[in-house]
Amino acid sequence: MKPKKSWQEKLLDSKDLPKVVILNENAQIHWHGQTMAIPSPMEVNDIMAGVPEGKLITIDIIRRKVAKKHGADIGCPLTTGIFSWIAANAAEEARSEGKKSVTPWWRTLKTGGALNEKYPGGAEHQAGLLESEGHEVIRKGKTYKVAGYEKKLVEI
């Protein structure tokens, strides 16, 4: 049995990515585009790593950056979300190994400014990290959201 890959190994495993694919007719109608850029894990990590303190980014913005970089109509929502999760876990793994400078994954939000409950430690941990940087996090039911996040988003 093969040993399980670390998060950092998963982050570095680009397989055959990035690439641009032509969508089939149904997908073109659904996604309102003809081509989709599928990023590599490191490409998503690098975008997340470039978000400075005080600023935020959403998965949708990452997708738009990926699409623009590769000349595609859209960025893949599935792989972008999965790779942001891998980047977050790889950063926490590195931090647990004593590394001080890691990708600030907590600055990456879901659509609408929501925190990601699938990130390391759940939404509560992400909220604590964001609050330590001066962001106000509000809770509505089970959902956490950054108040006024729209004014703090990075530019595309």
Image: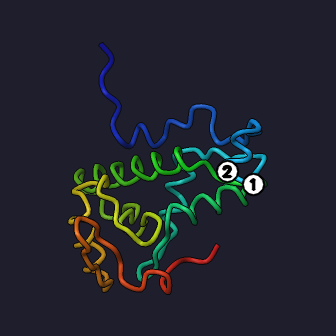
* Number of numbered callouts drawn: 2
Q: Nearer the viewer, mark 1 or mark 2?
A: 2
| Front one among 11 and 83 | 83
Q: Quadrant of residue 27?
A: top right
Q: Establish if 108 lies above or below 95.
A: below
Work out how far the residue at label 1 is from the one at label 2, CA to CA, in angstroms.
9 Å
Within 10 Å of the Cα at label 2, are there few (<14), some (14-19), or many (20+) other Cα atoms? Answer: some
Please identify the residue farthest to the top as the structure is shown: 1
Q: Which of marks 2 and 1 precedes in the sequence?
A: 2
Amino acid type, mark 2: Trp
Horizontal side of residue 148 vs 130, given as left or right: right
Q: Quadrant of the C terminus?
A: bottom right
Within 10 Å of the Cα at label 1, are there few (<14), some (14-19), or many (20+) other Cα atoms? Answer: many
Horizontal side of residue 73 vs 117, given as left or right: right
Query: x, y percentage for residue 42?
Result: 53, 49
Q: Which mark is residue 113?
A: none
Question: Which residue is rendered at x = 76% and y = 46% of the image?
Answer: 35
| Front one among 141 and 100 | 141
Q: Which mark is residue 73?
A: 1
Question: Which residue is rendered at x = 60% and y = 58% of the image?
Answer: 63
Question: Which residue is rendered at x = 64% and y = 52% of the image?
Answer: 75
Q: How is the image coloured?
A: rainbow
C-beta proximity under 8 Å, tags 1 and 2: yes
Query: x, y percentage for residue 52?
Result: 47, 76
* Residue assigned mark 2: 31
Query: x, y percentage for residue 112?
Result: 45, 71
Horizontal side of residue 108 vs 92, given as left or right: right
Instruction: Tell me the element at label 2.
Output: helix
Query: x, y percentage for residue 41?
Result: 52, 45
Amino acid type, mark 1: Asp
Instruction: Tell me the element at label 1.
Output: loop
Question: Which residue is rendered at x = 41% and y = 37% of the image?
Answer: 9
